[in-house]
Amino acid sequence: TASSLTIKEAIAQFLVTDRRFESDPDDVRNAAAVELGNALSTKIDTDMTALFASFTGGGGTIGVGTTALTWGQLFAARSRLAAGGTTGNTVPGPYVAVLHEYHWFNLAKSASVAGAQTNASAALLDDVNRGYYVASVGDMDIFVSNNISAGTATGNPAVSGVFNRQAIALDMRRAPRLEPDRDASARATELNMTVKYAAGVWRPTFGIPVLASASLPTG
């Protein structure tokens, strides 16, 4: 069953003085636009990754917040989606895994020269050691996001997600727009960037939360 989405607006702002415009040898307007755009994209990504905890597919959350993520847990999530887990509601592939940066660190470490030993395939070892990311494993694409929040409880728990893309909906109702607003009395110009969008869980049974520790890596 699909859900509904609510459109919202996000804004980021810079105030640039006339003196800065006149004395800065660099293009401050373009630099500000890049930073404003990055801020809004981070906001949208944070909203989307926060949705992982609302997935209900495959029988519920895999893992605990006090231990590191393992390849076994990642593939268990994929298998539960494919076979229905305890719910019997099978979810077709391909699948996507979006992981906290420190979750991916533990997986990469176990499949790299940094690990004590591994049974990973040569192709996977090459991918991890060469680029520190895995484009895909089987029918599952793996992405890393540093916008997944970690808790403050023991282990710094964080929720990553494994899902079919239909689990989440993103409606970009209006692309980011930059508008200057001159304030003569302040001898400055506001640079306002706004975007209208909606993000939400569309089909909650099409994803599984993957809970694991996101403690600071130590090597």
Image (cartoon, rainbow, N blue to C red):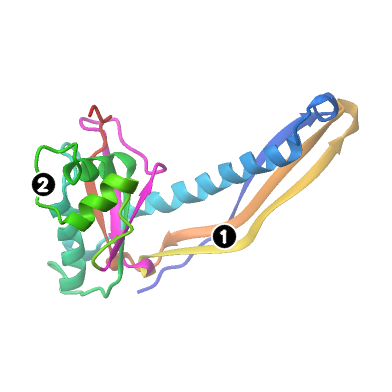
Q: Which mark is residue 109?
A: none
Residue for point 23% across, 64% down: 57
Q: Where 132 falls versus 152 (above or below)?
A: below
**Quadrant location, the N terminus:** bottom left
Of the residues under marks 2 and 1, which one precedes in the sequence? 1
Judged from the image, the secondary structure of the residue bearing numbered disc 2 is: loop
The kind of residue on which mark 2 rests is Thr
Residue 130: image x %, image y %? Answer: 31, 47
Disc 1 designates what residue? 7
Q: Where 6 falls versus 147 (above or below)?
A: below
Look at the image and give the residue range highlighted in magenta.
Answer: 139-165
Residue for point 37% across, 54% down: 51
**Quadrant location, the C terminus:** top left
Who is closer to the viewer here, 116 or 77? 116
Residue 150: image x %, image y %? Answer: 32, 37
Q: Where 86 falls versus 34 (above or below)?
A: below
Judged from the image, the secondary structure of the residue bearing numbered disc 1 is: loop
- Give the side of residue 173 with respect to residue 108, left or right: right
- Give the side of residue 10 with respect to residue 27, left or right: left
126 in the magenta segment: no
The kind of residue on which mark 1 rests is Ile
Disc 2 designates what residue? 118
